[in-house]
Image (cartoon, rainbow, N blue to C red):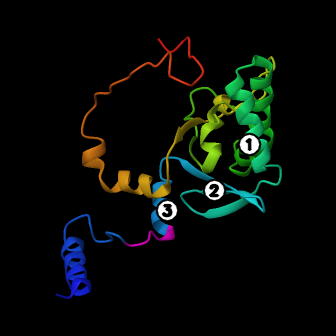
Amino acid sequence: MDMEADFKRLLEGIRKQDGFQRFLMEPENNDFMAAAEHHSIVVINVSEFWSDAILVEQHRIRSLNLPGLHESDIKANLKSIKNGDELEVWVALEWLWDVIAQPILEALGITTSPKENTEWPRICWIPIGELCQLPLHAAGRYSEDSDETVLDRVISSYSVSIRALLHDLRMPELVHSSNNALLVSMAKTEDQLDLPFAK
């Protein structure tokens, strides 16, 4: 029995099915840009040598160096947020703004709050590693009359990968088959901070 030949025949059969022409193939740049049709996609990579954001837009893909983003700072700010001290949380949110959110928004041309009655820009954040545990959507400087916050400038969402977004695009009938939604509030989660306003 030639398993490799059987596998190739199986793949050929799958790829002949409608919507599966690129099954198990690597995505191409056009695929990535297609995934950014409704929102910019921001993949944030962190390592001990280099940190950057991959900005995926409808018309281009580019890299943005984030020189102030270091693994040790992520660990320290994550610890501050988990400790729950209010002052430390504000400091961590400002750090997220200064080293990640603000440079990314500026590179995307989002420098102020959207004007009234205009469509808000959208960003899908794809953080890597421990950065996944930090609230990028809440990054900002929350002083009075400030619009230097992610919440004041964009509508945020998250994904685990661009591949997951591509899957969503390819299978709209499965993902968007209903106008109903189920919302579950979690005011208390074991080993996590309480969310008193979730109810």
Asked whether the beta carbons under mark 2 and mark 3 sit within 8 Å of each other, the answer is no
Sequence-wise, which precedes: disc 2 or disc 1?
Answer: 2
Task: Judge by depth and name the residue closer to the eye, 32 or 49.
Answer: 49
What type of secondary structure mainly makes up the magenta span? loop
Q: Is mark 2 on a helix, strand or loop?
A: strand
Q: Residue 55 carries which label?
A: 2
In the rendered image, residue 153, in percent from the top left (x then y), is placed at 66, 33
In the rendered image, residue 97, in percent from the top left (x then y), is placed at 76, 37
Task: Judge by depth and name the residue closer to the eye, 25 or 110.
Answer: 25
24 relative to 129 in the view: left or right: left
Write down the residue under mark 1: 74
Nearer to us of marks 2 and 1 is 1
Nearer to us of marks 3 and 1 is 1
**Label 2 packing within 10 angstroms: few (<14), some (14-19), many (20+):** many
State the extent of the magenta-drawn residues as a range.
25-29
Asked whether the beta carbons under mark 3 and mark 1 sit within 8 Å of each other, the answer is no
Amino acid type of the residue tagged 2 in the rendering: Leu
Location of residue 84 by image quarter = top right
In the rendered image, residue 173, in percent from the top left (x then y), is placed at 25, 47
In 3D space, how far apart are the residues under numbered discs 3 and 1 (Cα atoms)?
A: 27 Å
Q: Is mark 1 on a helix, strand or loop?
A: helix
Amino acid type of the residue tagged 1 in the rendering: Ile
Residue 157 in the image: above or below residue 108: above
Sequence-wise, which precedes: disc 2 or disc 3?
Answer: 3
Q: Which residue is drawn at 49% across and 62% down?
A: 32
Q: Residue at x 45, y 65 (%)?
A: 31
Q: Which mark is residue 32?
A: 3
Let me know if residue 179 appears in the view.
yes
Location of residue 83 by image quarter = top right
Sequence-wise, which precedes: disc 3 or disc 1?
Answer: 3
Quarter occupied by the N terminus: bottom left
